[in-house]
Image (cartoon, rainbow, N blue to C red):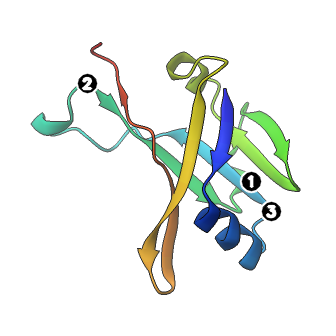
């Protein structure tokens, strides 16, 4: 599993001096009829306190923590693409990959 950032998210991380990110499975979304079979992920910035038994990667002075269960959804050669969404000061990092578990 490889974690990749697009150019806008790299600039955002550098500009805001983000030191760590946490990636975990979003257990609260997609509970309506339209989201059955797909899994979303949450990305938290500077939330190192959220990690308990998470795996750890260092990438370009950025600490990345992720739930071990992500390895169930992504194989060794798969990429997790992290992008940014938002407007003005209301920006958020997110995982652009959507996983369909019904395949």
| Helix, strand or loop for disc 3 | loop
x and y, in percent, of residue 66 in the image: 66, 37
Outermost residue, top direction? Answer: 103
Residue tagged 1: 48
Residue at the spot of label 3: 19
Q: Crowding near pointer 2: few (<14 within 10 Å), some, many (20+)?
A: few
Q: Can you give x and y, in whole percent of width and height, for residue 67 in the image?
A: 63, 32
Residue that appears at 74% across and 53% down: 48
Please identify the quarter of the rendering in which residue 102 is found.
Answer: top left
Nearer the observer: mark 1 or 3; the answer is 3
Viewport quadrant of the N terminus:
top right
Q: Residues within 10 Å of mark 3 (few under 14, many from 20)?
A: some
SS assignment at label 2: loop
Residue shown at 66%/44% (left/top)?
4
Count of numbered marks: 3
Percent across and percent down for residue 36 are 20, 28
Q: Looking at the rendering, in which quadrant would you find the C terminus? A: top left
Give the Cα distance between marks 3 and 2: 33 Å
For marks 1 and 2, the one nearer the N-term is: 2
Disc nearer the start of the sequence (3/2): 3
Label of residue 73 in the image:
none
Write down the quadrant of residue 44 in the picture.
bottom right
Residue under the point 71% across and 37% down: 52
Disc 1 secondary structure class: helix
Compute the Cα span from label 1 to label 3: 9 Å
Q: Give the vertical position of 102 relative to 41 (above or below).
A: above
Indicate left or right for 74 with 11 as reference.
left
Label annotation for residue 37 = 2
Near mark 1 (Cα within 10 A), the count class, few <14, some 14-19 or many ≥20, is some
Check if mark 1's residue and mark 3's residue have beta carbons within 8 Å.
Answer: yes
Q: Residue furthest bottom?
A: 88
Alpha-carbon distance for marks 1 and 2? 29 Å
């Amino acid at each position: 599993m490889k974690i990749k950032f697009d150019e806008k998210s790299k600039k955002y991380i550098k500009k805001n001096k983000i030191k760590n990110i946490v990636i975990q499975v979003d257990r609260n979304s997609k509970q309506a009829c339209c989201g059955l079979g797909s899994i979303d992920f949450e990305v938290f910035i500077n939330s190192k306190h959220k990690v308990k038994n998470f795996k750890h990667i260092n990438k370009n002075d950025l600490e990345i923590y992720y739930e071990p269960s992500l390895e169930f959804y992504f194989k060794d050669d798969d990429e997790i693409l992290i992008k940014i969404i938002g407007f003005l000061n209301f920006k958020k990092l997110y995982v652009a990959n959507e996983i369909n578990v019904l395949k």
